[in-house]
Amino acid sequence: MTGGLLVAGTTSDAGKSVLTAGICRWLHREGVRVAPFKAQNMSNNSVVVLDAANRGGEIGRAQAMQAAACGVEPDLRFNPVLLKPGSDRSSQVVLLGEVVDTVTAGNYRALRPRLAETAHAAFESLRDDYDVVICEGAGSPTEINLRDGDFVNMGLARRFGLPTLVVGDIDRGGVFAAFFGTLALLSPEDQALVSGFVINKFRGDLGLLAPGLDMIHAATGRPVHGVLPFHPDVWLDAEDSLAYGRTLGRPEGPRGTAWLRVAVIRLPRISNATDAEALAAEPGVRVLLTVEPGDVADADLVVIPGSKATVSDLAWLRETGLADAVRAHVAAGKPLVGICGGFQMLAERIHDDVESGDGTVPGLGLLPVEITFAARKTLARAAGSGLGEAVSGYEIHHGYASAGVPEPFLTYADGRPEGAVSGAVYGTHWHGAFESDDFRRRFLTRAAEQAGRPGFTVAPDTRYAAIRERALDVLGDLVAEHLDTGALRRLIEKGAPAGLPFVPPGAP
């Protein structure tokens, strides 16, 4: 099998990332050399990928998850353009893993030709190296105000002749209207590549839905190639915070006599919120994403996650009363952990002439360190130890500990200290540290003791990597069992069917 396919969506969080991963895992199990591709991603959830020269670069976390579905190592080409929003009006631009600019909506247009050229070259390179490339779109293909110059949705499909599936989330309602409207606002040339639909997150009687499938086929000339049921195990490696509900995952009951309640503060510019997913994978650990001071007051363990706008999000913590709730939590002797930007907020002072340009601002003063922002971003894989256990992770940050001699939380393999500990307050720049099973168990055991939860007992057999692999297999199973895989094969190998009807009015 050789060829490609674009998975587009009616909206953000319609299921593009998971459907792309599911198709990749199905093809991988069929023996196909397959790679994922997202020309441009807008997300603050990223991972570090090492290039051929062993230098670190960033791609979207969803593309790393899709790479795992393909059975291959993440590659910078899988997500050549990554936009990391730092405010409502500006984003950091990461091109083939490296920061090249910060743009606003106004000056993005001037940079777009360079981004498109890089993305197209990356796709062509992948097409040379793999049998099949499964592409993921961004947002909706029917963002008519952005169609001119588009290179991630129908612009990509048009350039490379990619047949396109449109996935819609029926759980939100209005999926048939979304399918019809998506198609009807595309130009005739774009419509000619839209080859069918996929319904996501269905719950209920498929017999009741069947007439609607026939009717949308009759109205558009395109079939629904399958209906994916809602599955509770599909929650890891979310593309962005839209995918998160209040409670992460589907926690099993505790192995001991008590639950451990974890509150993760949902910062406005939250980055790598996926760090909390490893905690949520543990039986008896209930992880809640929150913006409510009351939830912090009720929690046993509080997590301040990463942020793409540390100083701004720190100001938000103070404005909302969450900073006071965090201080009260610490004053009660309960554990708190800050990760990356969250760690930086715990410092005595933050010196930032780079990200915010605000100069020196007071931190929360909960760890005896000072943070200074460097112009060059640290991008690295990390390995070492913590709490007497092996730990690995990755670093993505401008800030670094520039003053203070705290007790380190972690230690690099070469003996350098990392992060800080003061009583029950912990901080680290390492993302992904809690995916190290023994370290996570040791930390949660200590956190439960400090929180006064002696009845909480960690499970001895939780393997986070195995949980992630099972989730990818679930996605592959859903595709194999609920989609018309014969139709998928034909689209990948032969392209969009000829003669697909035009649905008026078309693009204005």
Image (cartoon, helix red, strand yellow):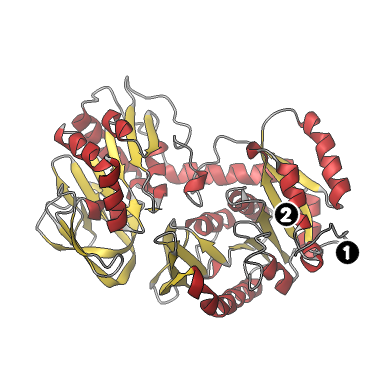
Q: Which mark is residue 476?
A: none
Q: Residue at x 27, y 40 (%)?
A: 322
Relative horizontal placement of residue 346, taking residue 187 as reference (left or right): left
Q: Residue at x 50, y 63 (%)?
A: 74
The number of discs equals: 2
Q: Which quadrant holds residue 412?
A: bottom left
- Quick one: label 2, few (<14), some, or many (20+) residues within 10 Å? many
Residue 387 seen in the current view: no
Residue 151 in percent (x, y) is at 63, 70
Q: Residue at x 53, y 55 (%)?
A: 68
Residue 445 in percent (x, y) is at 25, 34
Lower position in the chain sequence, tag 2 or tag 1: 2
Quarter containing the C terminus: bottom right
Residue 257 in percent (x, y) is at 32, 19
Identity of the amino acid at label 1? Answer: Ala
Relative horizontal placement of residue 388, taking residue 187 as reference (left or right): left
Residue 47 seen in the current view: yes
Q: Relative to 18, say whether 335 is above or below.
A: above
Q: Which quadrant holds residue 54?
A: bottom left
Q: Which residue is mark 2?
A: 182
- Quick one: label 1, few (<14), some, or many (20+) residues within 10 Å? few
Helix, strand or loop status at disc 1 = loop
Q: Which residue is mark 1?
A: 498
Helix, strand or loop status at disc 2 = helix
Quarter containing the N terminus: bottom right
Relative horizontal placement of residue 323, taking residue 93 as reference (left or right): left
Identity of the amino acid at label 2? Answer: Thr
Question: Of discs 2 and 1, which sits in the foreground?
Answer: 2
> How many angstroms separate mark 2 from mark 1 (CA)?
20 Å
Frontmost residue, 459 versus 203: 203
Residue 220 in percent (x, y) is at 84, 51
